Image (tube, rainbow, N blue to C red):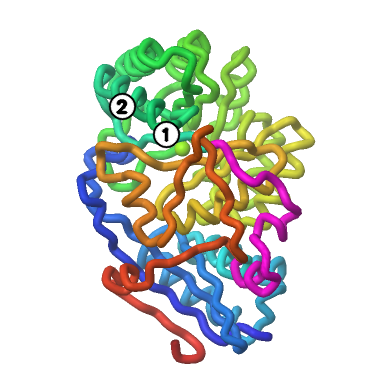
Amino acid sequence: MHIAGVRLRLLELPLGAPFRPAWGRGRVQTELVVLLCEVRTDTGLTGLGAAHGGLEAAVTIDRFVTPHLLGQDPFQVERLAAVIRDAEILGAPAYGMEIPLWDLLGKAAGMPVCQLWGGGAARVRAYCATGELRGARERARDVAQLADGGFRAVKLRFHHDDPRDDLAVARAVRDQVGDRIELMVDANQAGADPGLSGHRAWDFRTALAVARELEDLGVSWLEEPLPRHDLSGLARLRDRLATLRLAGGEDSHGLGEFRLLLERECFDILQPDALKSETASAIRHLAAFAGLAGVAVIPHTWGSGISLLAHLHLAASLPNCGYLEFPHDPPSGFTAAARDQLLAEPLVIDDEGCVRVPPRPGFGFALDEERAERHTVRVIERGDSW
Ligand SMILES: [Mg+2]
């Protein structure tokens, strides 16, 4: 069996209502951009996945990955992953190209990918990852509704001009929902979005003051409290906290950077993303070493249901994980329904706030082909005709 074709489809999907990401000051998002990646074999098997980014990722994959996949054995995932990793030297992160290979493998073996990865949990506890900044009263009401809807954990965003306004939101939420919800906070301080002005980065003392308040509120983890290269600041901050855990790493790239984060003892929780930080197989290797240091690996994910489903298998397979990031922030346009609009079977939480791993071969993507076609704006195909 060999790889006979690679197809990249760029989709622009409607969100239905505007979404204003906390991490991109001034940005109003009305579309969900998805790059679908498919790898087909000469026997007619197709593996599906998604990559991080839009056209820039498509160009990178087409120039630096596809030519090295065509004609190769798709089951040599670790070997092909080297090509996928190195694409980033000259282009956008292409780590997501490993996803269709694992999907192929699962389909060929007739089993879910997380079983190929050694088994693991049948379901994973979802934490609802909100994305917008809102006022205290509004956010408290919204989190209460999420709790009523079955979520057991919710992550808030901190990015107000004055961190005291962020803390007021967390306090209002805790007052409203009490202990029935586990709370996390993402400060998104690792890096500013390129080209957007107005990002006011926290310094060490701000991060420490906020973290101490969050400890008092019983928050589980604080994510990205400092710039991603301030390794000594992160380690110092972590050292001064008693119960609050530090999380981060979604903006790091490659195993080497994650090794540094481990060696410098920056985080209690590493959050690699199998589309933009490293390949899924490398994240699994990382998790083994993180486990030795008592560090959890709870992958980051954002974007479409395709990437969420891949990360669900990854989270289920890692012994030191236990959570699935579940992007969903009604009443903005970024909801689970908008996120999963390409899936015939959207991902939902059960009555204990967990997401079940679908018992289908591969990652279990059931793509709504008609919808995908309707919103495709660009196609790049190589190899046999599709
Ligand atoms: Mg984050």
Q: Can residue 363 be seen in this snapshot? A: yes
Report the residue at 36% width, 67% height from top: 55
Q: Residue extending furthest bottom?
A: 384
Q: Residues within 10 Å of mark 1 (few under 14, many from 20)?
A: many
Above or below, 48 against 271 in this view is below
Q: Residue beneath label 2, please?
A: 142
The part of the chain drawn in magenta is 103-125
Who's the residue at 41% across and 55% down the image?
Answer: 304
Answer with the quarter of the image where residue 135 lies.
top left
Along the line of sight, the residue nearer the viewer: 145 or 208: 145
Q: Is residue 75 above or below residue 115?
A: below
Q: Nearer the viewer, mark 2 or mark 1?
A: 2
Q: Position of residue 349 (x, y in %)?
A: 48, 41
Query: Element under label 1?
Result: loop
User: What amino acid is labelled 2 in the image?
Assistant: Asp
Q: Quadrant of residue 109?
A: bottom right
> Which residue carries the number 1 mark?
188
Q: Is residue 107 magenta?
A: yes
* Label 1, ligand 1: CB separation under 8 Å: yes
Q: CA distance from mark 2 to mark 1?
A: 21 Å
Nearest to the observer: residue 24 or residue 140: 140
- The numbered dot on residue 60 is none
Secondary-structure class at tag 2: helix
| Residue projecting furthest to the front | 351
Q: Residue at x 50, y 23 (%)?
A: 182
